[in-house]
Image (cartoon, helix red, strand yellow):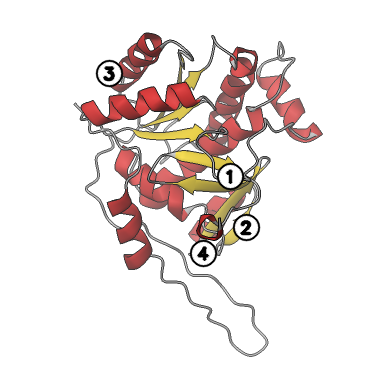
Amino acid sequence: MKRVTVGFNKIATVFVAGAVVLGMAACSGGSAVTPTVTPTAVKPSGDGILRIGDMTPVSGDLAAYSAAQAAGVDLAAQEVNEQGGYNKVPVEVLHRNAGDGDPAATEASFNDLVSRGVDVIIAPASATVVATLEELVAKNDSNVAIVSIANKKTAPKGATVAAITPDETLSKRLKASDPSLSELGYGAEAYDLAIASILAATVSKDDGGASITQGLIAVTLQTGFPCTSYGMCVSAVGDKQAINYTGPAGQINYDPTTGVAYFGKTIDVAKK
């Protein structure tokens, strides 16, 4: 079986100390370029096919947002595949019930996704689901990265956790992906986390869970070049620049120790 990776302190510490060495190189009359960031090496474990597991809350308090979350992930994969996919191979997406309020359903979906070889699971803004996934991660030995949309219980105090209303451009793209959509909340967040996960595998040059976890740190560096689309970010990486993918939902604040991501203004926990 694969080893589950939610993100952990050792990876974060090694990455920050050993790989995020940023400098500003400029010459007279020239513009500074932020060097590219290569995640600290972990043993490659991917099979070359990037599979995203989308755990949508088809039950519970967040059920109204399930279709938008699914559409966001699908749209991200579709757009990347139209540009050649991950490593010239189409990104695959598998949707399963998150089981919000039903830990048994959460576990069944998790186990099914792992058995099908998913590399990263995008989880909803549910404290119950996140807690269940943490327990599953602790008892499994699977190489799957988990990234969840933050909620009041998992985000720092003061962070924005309400569902973001997509702008008109993304709204049209989401509805094109799923014409039946009426509620669009969490569509932007899911889209951004899917794009960021694909970029994470790209900069890591591996689709294994541990590599994606490290890569998520690398592609959301606030000191990196602010790119707002997959194509723009890939181009910057090709130019050997560190990147900060900032999509429709805003700045991604990703905690590799928990797998939780909140959007918008960064909260300095040390000052709280």
Residue found at x 65% / y 47%: 264
Residue 234 x %, y %:
53, 51
> Does label 1 or label 2 sit earlier along the sequence?
1
* Residue 164 visible within the image: yes
Dot 3: few (<14), some (14–19), or many (≥20) neighbours within 10 Å? few
Q: Which amino acid type is marked by label 4?
A: Gln
Instruction: Give the farthest residue toward the bottom.
Output: 28
Q: Are marks 2 and 4 in contact (CB under 8 Å)?
A: no
> Does label 3 or label 2 sit earlier along the sequence?
3
Tag 1, which secondary structure? loop
Distance from the alpha carbon under mark 1 to that under mark 4: 32 Å
Tag 3, which secondary structure? helix
In this view, 241 is above or below 111: below
Distance from the alpha carbon under mark 1 to that under mark 3: 36 Å
Residue found at x 67% / y 32%: 162
- Determine which residue is flagged by label 4: 241
* Residue 140 visible within the image: no
- Determine which residue is flagged by label 2: 226
Dot 4: few (<14), some (14–19), or many (≥20) neighbours within 10 Å? some
Q: Are marks 3 and 2 in contact (CB under 8 Å)?
A: no
Residue 19 x %, y %:
36, 65
Q: Are marks 1 and 2 in contact (CB under 8 Å)?
A: no
> Does label 2 or label 4 sit earlier along the sequence?
2
The mark closer to the camera, 1 or 4, is: 1
Q: Which amino acid type is marked by label 3?
A: Ser
In this view, 201 is above or below 116: below
